[in-house]
Amino acid sequence: MPGKKTHNLSTREIVAGIETEFGIIRKDQEESDPVSESMALVKAYRSESFGAWAYDSEDPRADARGFRVDRLAQDEEEEAFSRSERRRFMSFRESKSDRILQNGARFYNDHTHPEYSTPECLTLHDLVLYDRAGTEIVRSAAKSREEEIGRKGSLGLYRNNTDFHGHSYGCHENYLLPRSLPFDRIVEGMTPFLVCRSLFLGAGKVGREGEDGLSKGFFQISQRADFIEERIGVDTMHHRPVVNSRDEPHAEPTLYRRLHLICGDANMSEWQTAMKIGMSRLVLAGIASTPSWGPPVLEDPVHAFRQVSRAENGNALLKLIDGRTMSSMEILEVYLSLAEAFADEGEDRWVLEEWKKASSDYRKNPHLLSDRVDWVAKRQLLDLFCAEEGIQDGDPWLQSLDLAYHDLDSDEGMFWPMEEEGRIRRLTDPRDVERATLHPPSYGRAPVRAAIIRRFEGEIRDAGWERIHFTNGMTLKLPLFQELDKNAVLLLCNQIGCCKGKEDLERLLKASL
């Protein structure tokens, strides 16, 4: 495609993060209000945190295609809250129950689900580490909440994407990219990849959901596929797109854009979490750096997304716009070839080798992926259960087992024993995870933001990813600090702790750039 600009983007320049919404129920009640339970869970987390989020720094209606939408699906929910009885006792901001945690993450009630957002990360190791720390943080909050209720086991928390009643909640990925990389080029390059990557990244699901309700006698590889309805769109709660077009960079908007992906599954497997970000970063680097490269163009990406999920073992034949067909594995191998040209050493090389190995194993027998891939491990569990109990597809037990696979309770969840016994690979060290629940990464904005909040907490009105607002009206914009090494950030944080006032702080940050 002549005339397109080359960007020479390295994966090491792409700041990334993951936001995970958890399913929540009260097991000791016939019915419970997820909003109230989510609020109570977040508030029950007892570690030190700062509790005022800077919502006026956000603009979820801005669309990367160059306009702002008038309404989002979430607006109706917020308006309903404003009209409800709860409005008499709390503001919408209070209902969010925001917590900016010591480790640089955000923990809050996102509409009807508790959500944990990792701090900004530059390495896959840290991203998986801080994502796993989120699981421990949510578990800790659940333990405290159950102590308030007075009944152990009264809360159910699930790292999945469906309640099997037509509602879906997300696991969102975020990639900070140069603004100069056109959004339409991102959409063109990423769409076939996002449609087909479920082959390695799906969480697995019993049943199929749609306008006609839930069909139980069925297994598919993606939990999110039933809820993807558009190719591109800004909404996240209804009309969910393959590529989300929200234009909210949380950084200097003239320099950066944030790719906010909502189509992926929430994974239990750490390998899948690492590969989800690692494969996507490699593809983004390839798209940015190869202006002449063009992917296979799917005739109907939304239909193809569901085809991949619902085909036996996911390897569906997908129709291209030129009339040809390619299998989902063949399309992934096109992207693997692109990634090979841009893989650097270290983590990139690890992702590339794991991608190749997964492709080889899949072609031999998809069940060889059971030590890495949730949908394969879950399918094997369900098949074993059916054989031992003599039950058939469609039995309600299978849906319960599906949910149990994602249960955060280490005693009740079916995933945890498999990981502990080594049947599913773990990438993090429990000691590192414990530390990551309390300490931010050693680079970037997260430790700087944490240091400022520690030093000036009583003078801060609210804070967000990009800005901190002080009670005297001063606004401090946080630079990304990608180029500062760990020692420089440590020195800066120590200097922040010694600042005598906000003016000292402002001068210090400007001087450090």
Image (cartoon, rainbow, N blue to C red):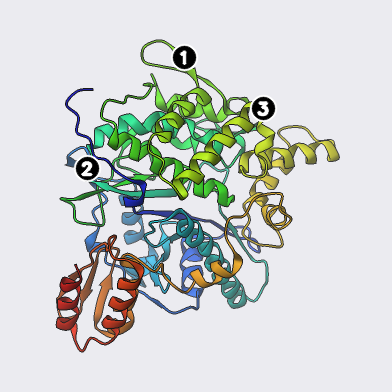
Q: Which label number is shown at residue 69? A: 2
- Check disc 1 and report its element: helix, strand or loop: strand
* Residue 222 in view, yes or no: no
Q: CA distance from mark 3 to mark 1?
A: 22 Å
Q: Which residue is mark 3?
A: 364
Instruction: Examine the rendered structure and indicate whether residue 268 appears above or below residue 212.
Output: below
Q: Which residue is mark 1?
A: 325
Please report the residue visible at 62 percent of the width from the left and 52 percent of the height from the top.
Answer: 406
Residue 495 in the image: state x and y as whole percent.
27, 82
Q: Earlier in the sequence, mark 3 or mark 1?
A: 1
Please report the residue visible at 23 percent of the width from the left and 53 percent of the height from the top.
Answer: 59
Instruction: Confirm or deny contact between disc 2 and disc 1 (CB under 8 A).
Output: no
Taking the image as shown, residue 117 lies to the left or right of residue 462, namely right
Q: Earlier in the sequence, mark 3 or mark 2?
A: 2
Of tags 3 and 1, the one toward the viewer is 3
Residue 441 in the image: state x and y as whole percent.
41, 67
* Residue 351 in view, yes or no: yes
Taking the image as shown, residue 388 lies to the left or right of residue 47, namely right
Mark 2 crowdedness (10 Å alpha carbons): few <14, some 14-19, many ≥20? few
Count numbered badges in the picture: 3
Please report the residue visible at 27 percent of the width from the left and 67 percent of the height from the top.
Answer: 54
Of tags 3 and 2, the one toward the viewer is 3
Q: Nearer the viewer, residue 46 or 272?
A: 272
Amino acid on which disc 3 is placed: Lys
Residue 21 in the image: state x and y as whole percent.
47, 55
Please report the residue visible at 47 percent of the width from the left and 44 percent of the height from the top.
Answer: 349
Amino acid on which disc 2 is placed: Val
